Image (cartoon, coloured by chain):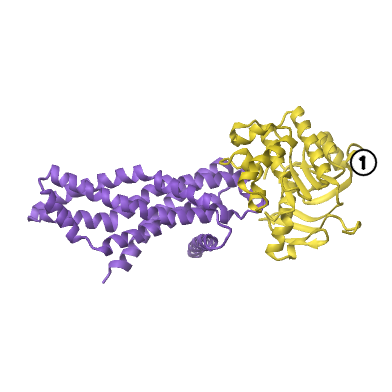
Amino acid sequence: MILDAVASVGRGSIGVCRVAGSIALFAATGVFHIFHPPFYGRMFLRALVEIAFFSLPVVALTAIFTGMVLALQSFTGFSRFSAESAVANVVVLSVTRELGPVLAGLMVAGRVGAAMAAEIGTMRVTDQIDALTTLSTNPMKYLVAPRLLAGTIALPLLVVVADILGVLGGFIVATLKLGFNPATYLKNTLDFVQTDDVVSGLVKAAVFGFIITLMGCYQGYRSSGGAEGVGAATTASVVAASILILAFDYILTEMFFAR
Amino acid sequence: MSADIPKIRIRGLCKEFGAKQVLDGVDLDVASGTSLVVIGGSGSGKSVLLRCILGLIEPDAGTIEIDGQDILSQPREAQGKTRARIGMLFQNGALFDSLPVWENICFGLLAQRKLLRGQARDAAGDFLAQVGLAPSVGDLLPNELSGGMQKRVALARAIAARPEIMFFDEPTTGLDPIMGAVIDGLIVDCVKRLGSTAIAITHDMVSARRIGDMAAMLFQGKIVWRGPATALMESGHPMVDQFIHGRRDGPIQMELRR
């Protein structure tokens, strides 16, 4: 009975290690192909436009509403101990360090990661990936490397937009609803925010962009079993990317800000 | 190349997936310039055999020689060069959904830098003509084509690099008899015109006799019969007889439950 339980835990642990190793190997192969020719510039540009440009509306709306809610919540909370003047500081710090990259990451994971897993998964189950190989094209180089690079570059670009719109959302609520002086609010924001706050958020975004495209490509590439398998790969890519984003958010925050 | 060295020679090829032995010591020779049709039931290992030669699946044991060179013992780069000499027509066409037909056809040539993109569109028109399609089809996407047209485009893609060896995986599956005959005719024309060596796998006995010079039957991972394709109907082999006549009773017992 006890041995069975231990064996079950052991099997589970081996399974987790096997998957982690498989993902690590896939990531290493993908990164290797980013730096070794031939390069597929058209595939890179296509992925960049898909991730950066077409995700703009969803990221922009998320950021602006988050900034608005943040200003409102922090005002009502801080007013209990007469610290309303800290609203601008809280909004800019929360948005640039945490909410901008994390929320943009989660939104892009849902939109782009799922689409990537579905596209590559469909190519896998309809033999298109095998066809690439027979046509002298390395699928890792053609399908995976350009997406990994595009994701790593696109998410920081989106987070720059999310940071600006998040702060703007807070500004709108603070000045139009809560009665803050616009000039004072902006001065507080600019005085308080430091380069490290923005840069740390952008570094996080680059890591999240890599994670999202990695999980989308990995799950799609490994999918099998027809439409059901592609559906499962799509779900797995979003779930895995979301969990990894939150886990790496903590790890990176610890690295940047732990004293 | 010496006349007595077959274009493709396979010896002792084995592959298992879990507990299932899919290929169990396959020995096969295909002479240069001839077409071999491999027949066999579903799950008998036909597709796995082609995928092992193409390098899409790594066999557990055995040798695969092309022009006398064992490709499994070659360095990866040399394997790639050898396999670039093989054209493949997949069962469902496997056309790239996101690319127009002309880019699908010339994909291999563009990948090997044998054509520039500007030249590829015109070249695709020539290849489309060879499979009986109008050049205007080149601007369509694969999902805008019928099944028969997709098969023809896939054939045009397979012949575009003028391969020395061609593989056809169930080329007439899912097509009506007339379109099946058209595809078979195109395959024979293309193989003869290019002087290629071909292996086709099929369940379709009419197609097998039209395409093949030679035929072989794969059963439970082994070649159980081989001979001229014209002798398929009078092979005298009980398994081949049962298979080609579609009899339920005989030496081949289908696994209905796994």
Residue nearest the observer in this picture, A65 or A142: A142
Q: Residue at x 86, y 51 (%)?
A: B32
Q: Residue at x 75, y 57 (%)?
A: B14
Task: Specify the colour of chain A.
Answer: purple
Chain assigned yellow: B
Q: Say whether residue B196 is left or right of residue A61.
A: right
Quarter that holds the C terminus of chain A: bottom left
Residues A33 and A11: in front is A33
Relative image position of residue B108 (x, y in whole percent): 66, 49
Q: Nearer the viewer, residue B35 or A51?
A: A51
Above/below status of B136 relative to A206: above
Q: Quadrant for residue B121, please give it.
A: top right
Residue under label 1: B236
Q: Is residue B59 visible?
A: no
Left or right: B54, with A7 as reference point: right
Residue sitting at the far front: B118
Residue at point 68%, 42% (across, down): B123
Kind of residue at badge 1: Gly
Q: Secondary structure at mark 1?
A: loop
Residue B49 at what x, y percent from top left?
75, 51
Quick one: label 1, few (<14), some, or many (20+) residues within 10 Å?
A: few
Q: Position of residue A151 (x, y in %)?
A: 44, 54
How many labels sit on residues? 1
